[in-house]
């Protein structure tokens, strides 16, 4: 569907209003539905259900900070997928929050990085690539939000070389809220102990040190004012 005011095509997801709460919600999941919440600044909270298969398709394509339209009783509402809870054992979706956005109001959210290429210094100097940041906070109109920001590692050819927030190529209309001097990725020398282990172990294609996984919660927009009822 086309948002006629902004002439932008958004993915659509049909949802239904929910009247089941508490322990009964478990039955929804067994039947292939996900309990969801719809809320936003100045908007009354609505309890929803979402077909799990339909949501999985949309979430895989749209990601965490792409505007989609949810259809409630035939009414189209632009939202961000704000919070996704998953079952730590099965990996299945447990609950979803949709944050209502106004297309003419800027929002604050996190945009993930996608690292491409290889850092030459890893092989040349037996160095370590440290990814200090996995995402960055931005401010933009909903229509201008990038799904992700690509960062090439090909320029990291020496120990001590880094990629900073100021090096990012950001489209017009998007403002970075992080310090321009913030380090995103850097090349470090291996400790002596690590070097000995590296000599005895098979050479890896690329050695990286990354922050721990975020777990079972996906957070998107850091909404300025969020009023949310208990699921």
Image: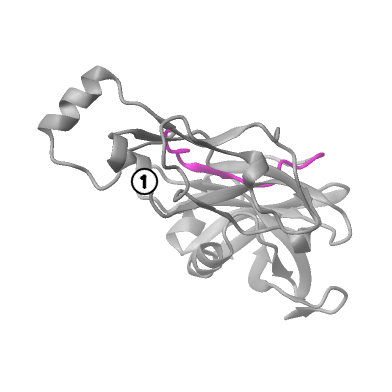
Q: Residue furthest left?
A: 200
**Magenta segment:** 212-225
Q: Main secondary structure of the magenta part?
A: loop
Q: Name the spot of residue 92 as percent of width and height, x first.
A: 42, 54
Position of 75 with respect to 212 (left or right) is right
| Magenta highlight on residue 218 | yes
**Quarter-wise, where is residue 223 in the image?**
top right
Residue drawn at point x = 69 percent, y = 73 percent: 10
Q: Name the spot of residue 49 as percent of width and height, x first.
A: 61, 61
Q: Nearer the viewer, residue 166 or 208?
A: 166
Q: Nearer the viewer, residue 162 or 36?
A: 162
**Quarter-wise, where is residue 72 in the image?**
bottom right
| Crowdedness near tag 1: few (<14), some (14–19) or many (≥20) residues, C-alpha within 10 Å | some
Q: Residue furthest top?
A: 192
Q: Name the spot of residue 137 as percent of width and height, x first.
A: 68, 42
Residue drawn at point x = 70 percent, y = 63 percent: 67
Residue of label 1: 120
**Quarter-wise, where is residue 167 in the image?**
top right
Q: Secondary structure at mark 1?
A: helix
């Amino acid at each position: 569907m086309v948002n006629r005011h902004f002439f932008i095509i958004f993915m659509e997801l049909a949802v239904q209003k929910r009247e089941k709460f508490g322990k009964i919600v478990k039955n929804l999941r067994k039947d292939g539905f996900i309990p969801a919440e719809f809320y936003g600044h100045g908007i009354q909270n609505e309890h929803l259900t979402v077909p799990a298969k339909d949501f999985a398709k949309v979430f895989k394509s749209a990601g965490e900070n792409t505007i989609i339209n949810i259809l409630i009783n035939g009414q189209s509402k632009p939202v961000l997928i704000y919070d996704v809870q998953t079952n730590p054992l099965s990996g299945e979706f447990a609950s979803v929050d949709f944050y209502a956005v106004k297309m003419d109001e800027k929002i604050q959210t996190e945009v993930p990085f996608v690292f491409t290429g290889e850092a030459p210094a890893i092989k040349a100097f037996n160095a370590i690539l440290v990814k200090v940041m996995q995402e960055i906070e931005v401010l933009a109109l909903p229509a201008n939000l990038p799904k992700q920001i690509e960062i090439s590692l090909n320029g990291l050819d020496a120990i001590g070389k880094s990629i900073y927030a100021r090096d990012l190529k950001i489209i017009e209309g998007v403002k970075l809220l992080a310090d321009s001097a913030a380090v995103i990725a850097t090349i470090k020398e291996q400790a002596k102990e690590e070097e000995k282990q590296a000599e005895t172990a098979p050479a890896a294609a690329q050695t990286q040190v990354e922050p721990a996984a975020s777990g079972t919660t996906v957070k998107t927009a850091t909404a300025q004012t969020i009023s949310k009822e208990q699921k």
